[in-house]
Amino acid sequence: MTKLAAILAVPIALLATVFSLGVMVVDVREGGPDGHHFVVPVPLVVAQAALAVVPAQRLPLDDHEALEHLPLAREVLRALAEGPDGELVRVEERDEHVLVVKEGGMLRVRVHKRDKEDVSVNLPLHVALSALPDAQGRISTLRLASALGGLRFTDLVDVRDGEERVRVWVW
Amino acid sequence: MKKSVLLVGGLAAMALLPASAAVAQTSTPWLHVRIEEPKKESRVRVNLPLSVVEAVLKASPEIIERHGKIHLGHDHGLKLADIRKIWKELSATGDADLVSVEEKDEHVKVARKGDLVQVFVDKGGKEEVRVEVPVSLVDALLSGEGESANIQAAVAELQKRRGDIVSVREEDSTVRVWIDDQNAQK
């Protein structure tokens, strides 16, 4: 009995450690009677470790104009992160509602298309800043890995389209 | 004794910190834009802290150069340096009607009244445009050198401004731009 407990203690402790460090869950539910349902849990510590060893990725941004606007995007994100909370955009049309709100360090986007789809995206601004390429179009995977570490208990993406649903959240 | 004074002082500072942060948050000026098209059942509201507007303008000097300088010259055949000279002359005159155009279907009036430059355009009741620009804002905008508009100084002036800046009323749509301390539109 003691042996069994000792044998089980190691994987349980490992699992507990992994879960305590956070798990990103990707949940895809297809529509229809034969629709599949995938749930992929990715321990953040694994994602971080993988990103940390991957060299900086260069985006295929050959367009000089696109690269030119990256500093602007960075400054806007930084100013938003440091700025006050509030409703930034509200679009109300006959069949579509869009809402963008800044709340804490999070940019929350809601899109509702009548009878079609609901999209909810919560973008942590510090992650967005880390994911932004530098002036040469390179994404620092190390910085991104470090930013991911701060993500806990966050619903990142939730898209519902009829019977189909995609959810990404961090637990 | 010194220790206890430091301790009390530190605690007081810690207690005051959140309060001062809250005050700073409520007094942040927000630029609001509201576009309504009742026939299309469309309403668009944009609210931006001026700090974000400022960041955009600071981070994109080329865009400002492109839009603030070249467009003025090309569209109106008037260089910014010329506008600066004219404005300097007008500033000395005080309250006055600067431009008045009266046509069959269109009335345009540009006037300086107190601290404001007012622009009214009335197209036979079909379209009404009303723009109110503080004199200090124009001063700030034209405080740059040569053909460069001083956008940063203009934004700094906008930080002090509260109230309507632009309102446009057309047959099918209305546009309103204003600044206040609210982080949402009522």
Image (cartoon, coloured by chain):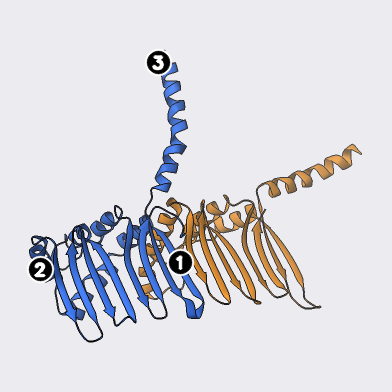
Are circles 3 and 2 on residues that touch, CB within 8 Å? no
Q: Which residue is mark 2?
A: B86
Chain A: drawing colour: orange
Q: Which residue is mark 3?
A: B2
Q: Nearer the viewer, mark 3 or mark 2?
A: 2
Name the chain under label 2.
B
How far, Cα to Cα, is label 1 from label 3?
A: 54 Å
Seen from the viewer's position, the closer of residues A94 and A75 is: A94
Task: Answer with left or right where residue B122 lies relative to residue A163.
Answer: left
Q: Position of residue B136 (x, y in %)?
A: 20, 57
- The residue tagged with tag 3: helix, strand or loop? helix
Q: Amino acid at mark 2?
A: Ile
Q: In the picture shown, does residue A19 fall above or below A164?
A: above
Name the chain under label 3.
B
Residue A83 makes an appearance in the image: yes
Task: Answer with left or right where residue B12 lies relative to residue A45.
Answer: left
